[in-house]
Image (tube, rainbow, N blue to C red):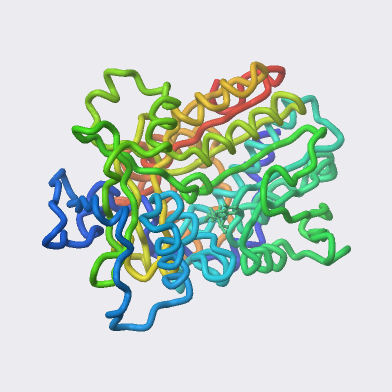
Amino acid sequence: MLRKLLTQTSSRRLLFSGVPPLFSKSTISPFSSLSSSPEPPSSESPAVEHPGTTISIDRSSLYTPPDHSHESTPDSELVKHLKSIIKFRGGPISVAEYMEEVLTNPKAGFYMNRDVFGAQGDFITSPEVSQMFGEMIGVWTVCLWEQMGRPERVNLVELGPGRGTLMADLLRGTSKFKNFTESLHIHLVECSPALQNLQHQNLKCTDESSSEKKAVSSLAGTPVHWHATLQEVPSGVPTLIIAHEFYDALPVHQFQKSTRGWCEKMVDVGEDSKFRFVLSPQPTPAALYLMKRCTWATPEEREKMEHVEISPKSMDLTQEMAKRIGSDGGGALIIDYGMNAIISDSLQAIRKHKFVNILDDPGSADLSAYVDFPSIKHSAEEASENVSVHGPMTQSQFLGSLGINFRVDALLQNCNDEQAESLRAGYWQLVGDGEAPFWEGPNEQTPIGMGTRYLAMSIVNKNQGIPAPFQ
Ligand code: SAH
């Protein structure tokens, strides 16, 4: 069956696809990006140097609201909103709160009002690079559905579907497996009304009831529902969850070791009315609570670190996923750029395919952080005894083991020269960067790929055994 999935050559998307030569978020190490981020320290703010960045420490700012009377350029709605939070709180906000507002503020958050992907947007993701990505995720879901005993009804949940491209390619790629597609109820967890509309369009949906956010995708005749959070997705049904480049958008707290213990990096407004980073004068409640909760890092590891990034939203989301999978059956696939280690200092901002200052014109650039895969594993195992966690493995290993080399060969049989070039470039962008032992690459230098920087991890109900290709 796997062979049938991989070798079917019909692919309507191929006819329209092109691979834009764009960079993904992982193109440059995030550890180099912070050097351009912080504001220079002001005269009354002693600076602490550490590799790649400077953080100004301003204890007084916690108690003295800054003077806002000298703005030179008009502030955007989001900047005004952030400044008012800081003003009325009487002090700086956490990096996590800043990140959440910048990305998902209902009025002006980065994701909320427009299409941010592709050549005209700010960054490129794997489903936009090549149709093969969504198709391979389709292979993964069909394999797990088989392991689940081919249930007649399955909730297929995607967290943060972007343009809906991955889901559209998954449905096209699996359309010949009627028993599978007929079992599906698709649930898209998406906070952005603009992207919900785009998903509706790309899944070729016809509305059943617009008030209930329910439609039918004509790609496979499957019902599609939209939700703002995973909690809203109905439970009690076997569930498959896909989270591609979702975790990296979840807010992170940043902590820095000091003589006073683990203090928190915060965002404040300086005398010049611009945003700047400051360090809390003593450990914040988040620092005390989260550093204690961070038990997946050994005390020795923590001892060595000067900076730590922790995402409690990611831990909570994982617990919710694991509880569902533990009680309803099924599994989750998480693919994101990150590390199989605790993360020190990775937050970065990207606008129009370039890294920019995190504090500059918030809402106009994406903010994302490396995903801490050990924390996901730990959170899942803590939440349910009925789940097992597999991986992470590199995206290159994941796609290679699922058979992307057979898929590219099958597609190459049935396309013109331009499409072949686009397919090959897409293939190398997905699996390139070190580990692509499955297919002979081009002679010239291969493009920088997402193959090793992106990792795949799976959480499954123990009844399902080990999911492909983690065996
Ligand atoms: N998975 C897609 C898009 C990744 S970008 C792809 O690979 O192309 C992140 C996506 O998650 C966007 O669709 C964004 O609107 C959504 N998103 C970000 N934060 C969210 C949140 N807190 N709740 C729901 N959706 C969110």
Q: Is residue 279 above or below residue 398?
A: below
262 left or right of 285? left
Q: Is residue 176 above or below residue 386?
A: below
Which picture quadrant has residue 1?
A: top right
Q: Position of residue 209 (x, y in %)?
A: 87, 64
Quarter of the C terminus within the rendering:
top right
Residue ID at (14%, 46%): 48
Query: Which image quarter has ligand 1?
Result: bottom right
Looking at this view, is 345 or 471 the one in front? 345
Q: Is residue 121 above or below residue 346?
A: below
Which picture quadrant has residue 241?
A: top right
Q: Position of residue 332 (x, y in %)?
A: 62, 34
Task: Report whether residue 122 is seen.
Answer: no
Q: Is residue 435 above or below residue 38?
A: above
Looking at this view, is 174 or 126 the one in front? 126
Residue ID at (56%, 23%): 389
Q: Position of residue 211 (x, y in %)?
A: 84, 65
